[in-house]
Image (cartoon, rainbow, N blue to C red):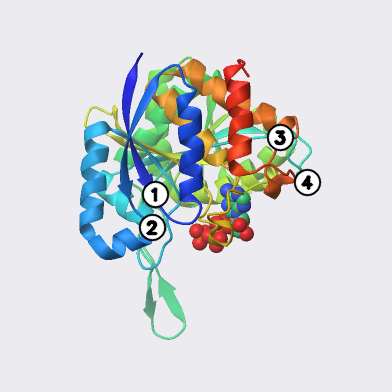
Amino acid sequence: MRTYRVVELHGDGISAELSRSVHRLAQALPCRLEFEAVDLSLESRERRGDGVFDEAEALVRRHRVAIKYPTATVDTSPNKILRERCRFAVIHRPVATIPGIESNFKRTIDIDIVRIATGGTYEDAGRRIGLDTAVSLRVIERGPARHAARFAFQLAIQRQGGVVSTSKYTIQRLTDGLFEEACGNVARDFRGVPYRRELFDSLLAGIIMHPERYRVIVCPNEYGDFLSDTACGLIGSVGLGDSSSYAFDDAGQIELAMFDPAGGTAPDIAGRDVANPTAALFALSSLLRHLGEVDSSRALRGAVLGAIAAGERTADIGGSLSTSAFSEAVAARFGAGA
Ligand code: ATP
């Protein structure tokens, strides 16, 4: 049986039940995942300080693949620390309609949002000039733009779709212009993949009016942040999606990958076996695809979607199943070939 070592970064709140659900489905796989745990809970971070991040970074660098559960942010966000230490340059957020989930949006959407993980307006909180004026710097770097674009085109090949790069290149002519230049250069290496660029404001309207015209979207940091939540709103849930972070070596190959449910720690329901593990299981599915276990990845996602569509749901989306009962329902479908 193929065996993979996977670092498991435990966090706070519902992290424990999400991990149990991931382990339950991992048991059902035709390959073996050997998890190596690091405790990134607030208690552990307060007790061990930087040591806990030293351990996490060393293990992620050793095994190159990690799954992370939600962590509480008190001062600095653990996600930011991990991003800086592991040099995650690109974030991927798949957002697709989940049949059975209520939404105000009546169309089907299936997009992959690929964004630069750093820079944009997020590195500089700004400074005041006198009482009534403030400025901040906006950063766009060619290296991460190229990584994001390359990742987007490779994903588009897998997904048999096209790539749209988006920014405000007619206004931010030099910064977003540099981003678009990097995307355009990468596009030349992927002649067979349909590619166009669109202004970000027009893309937002386009996704709502013609969602079928969009498959893989690549953009700078802050636009990707806005777009991810907008798209999640369209599918009726900000909490059911997963997110992946990637670091690259000098040759542009993926060096490190971390997969996580995009939602929060939900302390109000922690420890009661009621949390919805859908996003964590989607994260596991994305991890499997990254490992090359494409059939298992697809089957797992299908099993989760099948369970939800059949009304086997946790309470937050109108069902009555516990976390563990939902995980069993997904495992049963997975075992039956979904
Ligand atoms: P954080 O500060 O970590 O973001 P939070 O509770 O402020 O935590 P969320 O974790 O996003 O923010 O939770 C918002 C609401 O959604 C809470 O009522 C929570 O119980 C619910 N919720 C979040 N995640 C889940 C989940 N996986 N399953 C069920 N309910 C959830």
Residue 310 shown left or right of residue 324 in the figure: right
Vertical position of residue 133 compared to residue 160: above or below = below
Mark in front: 1 vs 3? 3
Mark in front: 1 vs 4? 4
Amino acid marked by disc 2:
Arg
Mark in front: 2 vs 1? 2
Amino acid marked by disc 4:
Asn
* Earlier sequence position, callout 1 versus callout 4: 4
Q: Which mark is residue 104?
A: 4
Q: Which residue is mark 3?
A: 312
Q: Residues within 10 Å of mark 1 (few under 14, many from 20)?
A: many
- Image quadrant occupied by the N terminus: top left
Instruction: Name the residue nearer the viewer: 42 or 117.
Output: 42
* Earlier sequence position, callout 1 versus callout 3: 1
Q: Which residue is mark 1?
A: 175
Residue drawn 63% across the image and 36% down it = 326
